[in-house]
Amino acid sequence: MGAIRILSARLRGLLRREAVIGDIDEEMRCHLEMVVEANVEQGMPPAEARRAALRSFGNFDSVRQRAWEVRGGGMLETFFQDLRYGARVLARNPAFTAVAVLTLALGIGANTAIFSVVDQLLLRPLPYPGAERLVMLWEVTPDGTHQNTVSFANFLFWRRETRSFAGMAAFSDQRVNLTGLGEPEEVSLQLATAELFQVLGFKPILGRGFTPEEMLPDGPRVVVVGHGFWRRHLGGDPGAIGKVLQLNSRPYTVVGVLPEGFRWHIRKSSVASRPAEIWSPLALPTEGPATRGRFLSVVARLKPGVSLTGAAAEMKTMAARLENESQEFNKGFGDEVVPLREQLVGEVRPALLILLGAVGLVLLIACANVSNLLLARVAAREKEIALRTAVGARRLRVVRQLLTESLLLSLLGSLLGLIFAAWGLRALVAISPRELVTLQGVGLNLPVLAVTLAVSLATGVLFGLAPALESTRLNLNDSLKEGGKGTAGQGARNRRLRNALVVAEVALALVLLAGAGLLIKSFVRLQAVDPGFRADGVLTMVARLPGGKYKEDRQKIDFFRQATERIRAVPGVRDVGMVNFLPFYGGLGAATAYFVEGRPAPPPGHFTTADVRVSDAGYFRTLGIPLLRGRGFTDVELRESRHVLLINEAMARQGFPGENPIGKRVKVVMGPDSEPGEIIGIVGDVKFASLTEEAKPTVYEPPPDLTYSAMTFVIRTAGDPGEMAPTVRRVLREIDPDQPVSDVQTMERLLSDAVRRNRFNTLLLGLFAGLATLLAAVGIFGVMSSAVTLRTREIGLRVALGAQQGQVLGLILKQGLRLTLAGVVLGLAGALALTRLLAGLLFGVGSTDPATFAAIAALLTLVSAIACYLPARRAARVDPLIALRYE
């Protein structure tokens, strides 16, 4: 050993005396290391390997000549040598490499998948020119409801009086029947003012947009069609301009085709609940009662140089002017300006950022796990590193080599992680809620791949730096002793670092588990909420009667009455009913003010409002909505207008506190000719749009009193409701061959979709928390296995001196559980702080729920105990004779 150190010192001294620059000196040491390694691999004793390496260079002149030869490309050649050597090291340890790569792949793959979603929804520019200046304009109701739709009169006032906007357009969605192009079909149509395409920054690729003359109430019927509709229904014919479409049995002339990238859908205000395929002019009445109804959505483009704050301030002034000029209709109403991106993804932004943070924690745990594995490898490679140091390798050189191996692991993990990410993205799209419609185009693009590469490089440095630095703190004399196990100080430092990493893993895993536990408990409570009806065994479908064919109310009433009678006669149908707005269907429904006859009219801005539904008696029977007091609709009341009403419990509490509403007369304002109706019964509350919201006051009217062209059938079946759909379709076609039906689905599916976003958040965070727990358990298992290996002789002595298996088992379990409890304490502190971010995603449970935290801490402790038990059991079975001979 002394001879090796003398030879190494002599070589370094010669290099210093000849003043060879650092990169040449480094290259020479690297070359010596490679030769020594090759000699050792061939079976040569370490001391002889070093002497042979030094002899292979001959005298110093040849060494210097070799150094100068490689001077120009020395650093690059050294880098490739590091790569080749690192690849050989990883290949010689396939089990270690596979575990490390798989661990990193899981962390990097999860991050890549979630970042792809975040990039698609939050970072990538919206597909509209100058999208950062697009805003939505809404009203705020006197009771504080935000993003309320706008009236014609107020839109016209904004468009005329505001100075902050370069353009403003109003629109409203609906569905229409398309006939004459094959099978009858229901399509989505958007009524829009002529400025819409200009405000959004698009021009038709064929034809034109709308003219001012086409916006008049008696203007010509024209449409602009979307690119998909043009391809699917018009064959992509460039001569499609001028063709006539039959929409609701009325002719409309095609005047334009929009470009392929145009996609416009504001779900908040849409009664169609899906993107439009056709656009038609929105006729703008200038006076009269028709201007007062609030059903329009408004999009505007800010002028250059106008800030969002400035526009909001001007809109606040507009609200004050409107309230002053029209107390009856605008008292208490306010305005708000919402950036378009906030409008499109504002509801899902918090959940996405939380999921991004969650996968970040998973990656940190994966890094800690791989770092722990590398620290164990450093202990196993102590002699190798000591030999390289003995022949002249500087500390930086050894660190660089080990970091190269870490980066190789990280790059391999990122390649496998991209495969996991591609699989994960497909799964994310499949389970994503309906409001994430833009997820259909999400994928692994260049920005995402660049971020993945950056993450993989940063990850390689993160998990590789600590083991690399630890490897250089060696005592060469002790490390190179035959049979030496390294110094006590070196082993203690390594163990402390590995223990600290395990504590960090447990803490991070507990934070994720706590968040997942809260979401799971919240989801369970949400699913336990009573929606007010029975969803099992119910089929739903929508029929919209075209105004061109069914012009009279009596025609519509007769069609729906005949349809329900024929459907009820179908074998397997237990009952059938209909309603204009179905719970959880996705439409807005209708809400308006009502006045109780005999009471003084409330002052402007203090009206009581109720949702309005049109239904028959079968609707309540089919969905199991209970009749609490009074009676339901009779057959006569379903055929002829008798001005009767049913109300729900919420309306009884709101409008008639401490009174019996039966027999009272109420005027529901649905138009200038609305007449009072008599309350004949009270039915149970039904949640309409969300399980988390209280049921709203609701009034039900029979079809003769308030006739709608679109109704939803609810059909209770004796068997699988999905199997009944073709038969019911056929029955409706027998009544009217040109009448399509749409949205054929079960009530259970609708109810399931209502909690789809909650399920999405819970499933993903639960998956990431489970993965984090698994990685933490693997980390604990690895540390305890290493501890058992290092303490084999100690355990052998204890057993030889009379220690029982239970005592040895308890010794190892105590060491592991001590680390676990430290991690649990730190994790609980972190969880108490971070789970507050989940408050907006929870229902019926607090963000610091003690029961959940206690259960999660107990679960993680149990998992850790199992991970500790396996190596502890191995330690308890150690043969003392073998242990005392262990080297």
Image: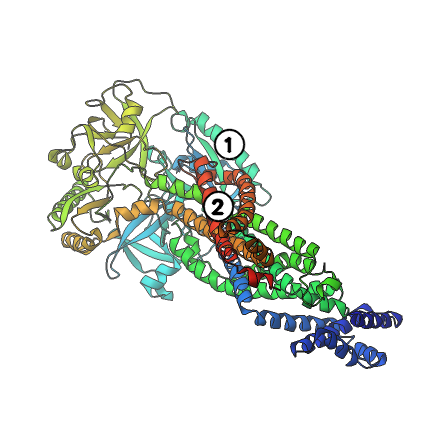
The first of marks 2 and 1 along the sequence is 1
Q: Residue furthest front?
A: 801
Element on which disc 1 rests: helix
Q: Nearer the viewer, residue 806 or 271?
A: 806
Element on which disc 2 rests: helix
In the image, residue 342 sits, relative to residue 85, either above or below, namely above
Under mark 1, the amino acid is Lys
Q: Quadrant of residue 399?
A: bottom right
**Where is residue 822 shown, x and y percent of the image?**
56, 43
Task: State the residue position of label 1.
Answer: 316
Residue 569 appears anywhere in the view: yes
Q: From the viewer's perspective, is the residue at label 2 or at label 1 nearer? A: 2
Q: Quadrant of the C terminus?
A: bottom right
Tell me the tag on residue 861.
Answer: 2
Under mark 2, the amino acid is Thr
Q: Residue at x 49, y 36 (%)?
A: 161
Q: Residue furthest right?
A: 17
**Where is residue 82 shown, x and y percent of the image?**
67, 70
- Circle 1 Cα neighbour tier, 10 Å, few/some/many (<14 / 14–19 / ≥20): some
